[in-house]
Amino acid sequence: MNLTPRTLGLLFAIATAVFWGLYAPALGKARIDGQTPFKPYVFIGIAYLVWGCLGGAIAIQLSGDGFSYPGSTGWWGFIAGSLGAFGALTLTYAMYQAKDASLVMPVVFGGATCIAAITGLVIQAQKGSFHLDIRQVIGFVLVVAGVVLIQKYSSHGPPPKKPTAEAESHAAVEPAVETPST
């Protein structure tokens, strides 16, 4: 099977979507009620370090390139890694607060798509070649509409439990407590 670079790029993009799509549910599993949500974040950092360094080194070796780095590669690589780490940190907190991946992930990925496109437009404008296609504007609108629809119609956890007959009868017997006015 002879795959074109474009096809390989698409396959790796799909793999990225799968990995990142599974990230939040795995993060939810790592969290323990009553403990800080940032305990898993330490291990997320270790995983980034191990797989980032090991995977990068293997990929450099397989590509036949050397291990010398121009300054901009290191600087922008560090910035990109920091943005990824800060994203993992803020995603950890979002998942902790919302307690539901189906609530958080559409906003994260829909928002990330829009931010990446807007950043591309800003970079174009800085180079003096700004061009906004109406199809891109329509895409922004569709992403926002899609996030809203996904949010509204996704399951956000189990429905509230119905009170048992015993709890209802207990509530009916309890007298209302009035607070004294000052």
Image: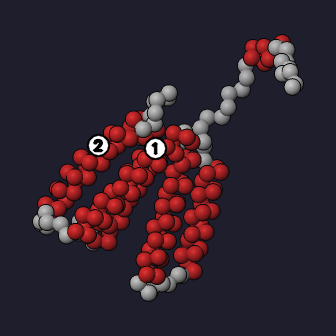
Q: CA distance from mark 2 to mark 1?
A: 15 Å
Q: What residue sits right under mark 2 in the picture?
A: 46
Q: Residue at x 53, y 81 (%)?
A: 132
Q: Residue at x 34, y 39 (%)?
A: 42
Amino acid found under the numbered disc labelled 1: Thr
Amino acid found under the numbered disc labelled 2: Ile
Relative height, residue 78 to residue 171 (above, below) = below
Q: Are marks 2 and 1 in contact (CB under 8 Å)?
A: no
Relative height, residue 178 to residue 37 (above, below) = above
The N terminus sits in image quarter: bottom left
Residue furthest out toward the front: 182
Q: What residue sits right under mark 1 in the picture?
A: 92
Q: Earlier in the sequence, mark 2 or mark 1?
A: 2
Q: Residue at x 55, y 78 (%)?
A: 135
Q: Position of residue 17 (x, y in %)?
A: 41, 56
Q: How many marks?
A: 2
Which corner quadrant of the image does residue 164 belong to?
Answer: top right
User: In this image, 9 relative to 29: left or right?
Assistant: left
Camera-side residue: 157 or 89? Answer: 89
Q: Position of residue 56 (x, y in %)?
A: 21, 57
Which corner quadrant of the image does residue 181 belong to?
Answer: top right
Helix, strand or loop at mark 1: helix
